[in-house]
Image (tube, rainbow, N blue to C red):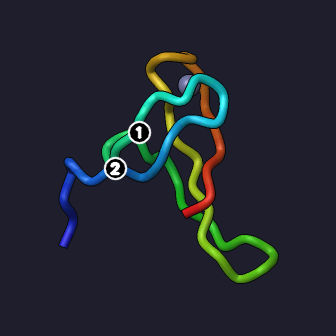
Amino acid sequence: MTDESTTIGRCPDCEMELYEYHVLIEFETEDGGTGVFADCPECDDVVRLNR
Ligand SMILES: [Zn+2]
C-alpha cells in the first residue's frame, strides 16, 4: 500500500519535509538499509536520504 502523503524524511540540505511522491528511486545501501533519491522542490535538485 502506498500512501502518497507519507513523509520519507527531511532534505539533508534545506531540511524541507519530503514525501513519497518526491521519491525518484530506492536502492539498497552497503549496510543493508534502504536509501532513496528524491527530488527536492526547495533545492530544485536530487538529494539522497536514508530510510
Ligand atoms: Zn532541499
Query: As drawn, is 43 to the left or to the right of 42?
Result: right
Q: Quadrant of the N terminus?
A: bottom left
Left or right position of 26 against 41: right
Q: Which mark is residue 47?
A: none
Report if the beta carbon of the residue with label 2 is closer than 8 angstroms to ligand 1: no
Q: Amino acid at mark 1?
A: Leu
Say few, some or many: other residues with alpha carbon within 10 Å of mark 1 (under 14 / 14 to 19 / 20 or more): many
**Quadrant housing residue 12:** top right
Check disc 2 and give the amino acid type: Thr
- Position of residue 24 relative to residue 17, above or below, is below
Please give the label number shown on residue 18.
1
Report ligand 1 position as a quadrant: top right
Residue at 61% in and 32% down: 46
Q: Residue at x 41, y 35 (%)?
A: 17
Secondary structure at numbered mark 1:
strand
Asked whether 16 or 28 is in front, the reply is 16
Residue 11 location in percent, x, y?
56, 35
How crowded is the residue under tag 2: few (<14 C-alpha within 10 Å), some, or many (20+)?
few
Q: Quadrant of residue 15?
A: top right
Residue at the bottom extreme of this rendering: 32
State yes or no: discs 2 and 1 in contact (Cβ < 8 Å).
yes
- Where, quadrant-wise, is the C terminus in this rendering? bottom right
Residue 4 at x, y percent in the picture: 21, 51
- Disc 2 and disc 1: Cα gap in Å? 6 Å
Label 2 sits on residue: 7
Residue plotted at (50% across, 40% down): 10
Q: Identify the residue at image location x=46%, y=28%.
A: 16
Secondary structure beneath label 2? strand
Mark 1 beta carbon near ligand 1 (under 8 Å)? yes
Looking at the image, is 16 positioned above or below residue 50?
A: above
